Amino acid sequence: MKKSAVILIMVLTTLMFIAGCGSSGSSVVGTYKFKSPAGTAVLNLKAGNKATYSISDKLAGLPVTYKVKNGTVVLYGADGSDLKAAHFKIVSTGLSDLGGNIYKKQ
């Protein structure tokens, strides 16, 4: 009986640890770049759901936050608003924006 209880506690603890790691978005942490003839866009996802987003020389290093929801990285502005045009689907090669452009993980 005691052995069963110990095993159950170990399994539940492991599941809680896995669930906690997944919710932080830690698997997407890194730098992603999309190069086009118009220039390079850079999305830098950091630990703690903080990020910077550079889409041009004039809009470089914008501080944003992010959450991972249903296989998508969703960016939020400084005021906490959902940046509707800045949703990125997680794909095998990096992130795909709404236009299908691939931001490759560096």
Image (cartoon, rainbow, N blue to C red):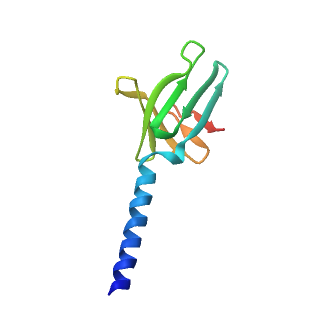
Q: In the picture provided, is 22 more to the left or to the right than 82? A: right
Q: Quadrant of the C terminus?
A: top right
- Image spot of residue 72 (x, y percent): 45, 42
Residue 69 occupies quadrant:
top left
- Image spot of residue 74 (x, y percent): 42, 36
Give the residue at x 35% y 27%. 80
Residue 38 occupies quadrant:
top right
Q: In the picture provided, is 62 more to the left or to the right than 35? A: left
Question: Can residue 49 be seen in this snapshot?
Answer: yes
Q: Give 81 or 48, whichever is nearer the viewer.
A: 48
Seen in the picture, residue 39 relative to 13 is either above or below; the reply is above
Give the residue at x 59% y 42%. 94
Seen in the picture, residue 35 relative to 66 is either above or below; the reply is above
Q: Give 76 or 2, whichever is nearer the viewer.
A: 2
Q: Give 85 or 56, whichever is nearer the viewer.
A: 56
- Image spot of residue 91 (x, y percent): 55, 45
Furthest toward the front, the residue is: 2
Seen in the picture, residue 79 relative to 46 is either above or below; the reply is above
